[in-house]
Image (cartoon, rainbow, N blue to C red):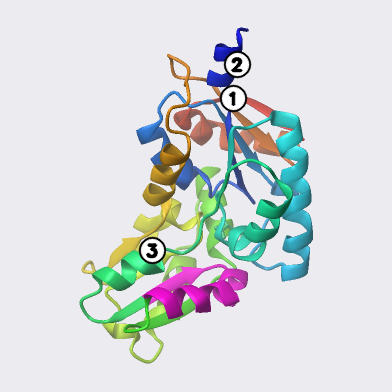
Amino acid sequence: MSTDNQKAHAPLLFFDSGVGGLSVLAETQKILPNAPVIYVADNAAFPYGTKSEAEIATRVPLLLGKLAERFQPRLITIACNTASTIALDSVRQVLDIPIVGTVPAIKPAAENTKTGVIGLLGTEATVRQNYIDVLAEKFARDVVLLRHGSAKLAPAAEAKIRGENVDPDIYKRAMHGLLDQPQGKRIDTVILGCTHFPLIQNELAQFCSETINFVHGGAGIARRIDYLTQGQPWPEEKQDLHFVTTGNIAELGPYEHALGAYGFAQYSTL
Ligand code: DGL
């Protein structure tokens, strides 16, 4: 391969605890359709949302260091709010390539609310982060931000992608975790603050008024990736994408049908 060709084939690496990052990948593919992609799901440690800060803060930088060395990506996207709100700064300190993080879309939600009440649905770990207080203080001072952390939604999104039936009560309880709080009935914007949640947005929407607007960071992250790679070469054709799990490869079987639709054709374990 010539050096130019090598550069064009340097992958974008997407990282999440599971398949949630597909909601970010899908937006990126709209802008960079031929991008070579390595998608890494840390299935061995899924879910992140019920883990401690210490566990995430230790695991994610180590793993990303190993992945950067192995796959030599041109850029890494931490397509996970839990990992980003806890470990983004430390990952940036140890790696010498551009790192794009994913944090809840509080700013656009606060800008667009008409009622002045917005809701954040995230994992339990994400909603308790100081990072969220900082975003709220910076962008949502004049609005009420209600938060609800769900331990069940990310596993439900995984089950959906595997083609399994999910108990609708899981979606109902999560939405009511916001709507039943004081002022909850006034929420007009719900921030999907976990990358798994856009994958189940339609299911969540069944349990709230249709006037509620759902927002997430996927499109903004895709624009950021595009911006940071401006002027770089890309392959001339759409590439077969590579899915890597830290878990057992045999467990990927039920996911392959859904993953094929995103262009994945190669599966391996770390
Ligand atoms: N997709 C992840 C996020 O954005 C975390 C889901 C989980 O592992 O709990 O927060």
Q: Position of residue 148 (x, y in %)?
A: 49, 77
User: Which residue is nearer to you in this view: 33 or 188?
Assistant: 33
Q: Residue at x 70, y 47 (%)?
A: 43
Mark 2 element type: helix
Q: For the view shown, which residue lies furthest in the top direction?
A: 1
> What amino acid does circle 3 point to?
Leu
Q: Is residue 178 visible?
A: yes
Q: Decide: is 56 above or below 199.
A: below
Would residue 169 be found to the left or right of residue 214 on screen?
right
Q: CA distance from mark 1 to mark 2?
A: 6 Å
Contact between marks 1 and 2 (CB within 8 A): the answer is: yes
Asked if the stretch drawn in magenta spans residue 215, the answer is no
Residue most toward the bottom?
Answer: 182
Residue found at x 41% / y 63%:
105
Q: Which residue is under mark 3?
A: 204
Q: Is residue 208 visible?
A: no
Q: Main secondary structure of the magenta part?
A: helix
- Which circle marks residue 171 in the picture? none
Q: Nearer the viewer, residue 233 or 114?
A: 233
**Residue pointed to by mark 1:** 10
Q: Secondary structure at mark 3?
A: helix
**Image quadrant occupied by the C terminus:** top right
Checking the image for residue 6, the label placed there is 2
* Secondary element type, mark 1: loop
Q: Magenta segment, which residues?
A: 119-139
Check disc 1: other Cα within 10 Å, few if <14, some if 14-19, many if 20+.
Answer: many
Q: Check disc 1 and give the amino acid type.
A: Ala
Residue 5 position by quadrant:
top right
Dot 3 or dot 2, earlier in sequence: 2
